[in-house]
Image (cartoon, rainbow, N blue to C red):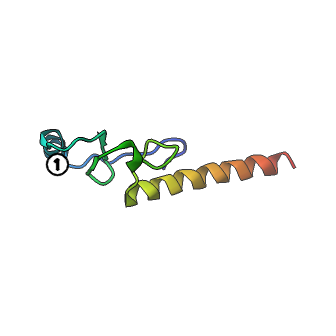
Amino acid sequence: MHEDWVPVQIPENLDEMLMAWSDSPEESVGFCLLCGHSIRTESNLIAGTSTHNCEAGRALEAKINAQIQGRIETDDSATD
């Protein structure tokens, strides 16, 4: 993460990945750029987010939450 944004690294084979996803007969609600897999249903998202519940998605959410928590602690100490 860099300040308030998260850089997403686009895989070199993104075109192939998206073609495989769009050609798949299985239904899905999206495609995860973090792990490269389709997102089958909304239940495959981390609750309260739009992040895929995969290892990389959980790591991303942990980083985001740590940054938010750090910001909250900094704000609290500024008011003491």
Disc 1 target residue: 13
In the shown orientation, is residue 63 left or right of residue 22? Answer: right
SS of the residue at dot 1? loop
Front in this rendered view, residue 67 or 40: 40
x, y percent for residue 63: 52, 55
Front in this rendered view, residue 24 or 32: 24
Instruction: Please give the name of the residue rendered at 28% of the width and 46% of the height, measured from the top-left corner.
Output: 10
In the shown orientation, is residue 23 left or right of residue 55? Answer: left
**Number of marks in the rendered image:** 1
x, y percent for residue 36: 26, 51
Front in this rendered view, residue 58 or 70: 58
Instruction: Please give the name of the residue rendered at 75% of the width and 46% of the height, measured from the top-left corner.
Output: 75
x, y percent for residue 8: 36, 46
Instruction: Please give the name of the residue rendered at 12% of the width and 40% of the height, measured from the top-left corner.
Output: 23
* 10 Å crowding of disc 1: few (<14), some (14-19), many (20+): few
When the figure is inspected, residue 80 is found, relative to residue 55, above or below; the finding is above
The image quadrant of residue 19 is top left
What amino acid is labelled 1 in the image?
Asn
x, y percent for residue 45: 42, 47
Instruction: Please give the name of the residue rendered at 79% of the width and 49% of the height, measured from the top-left corner.
Output: 76
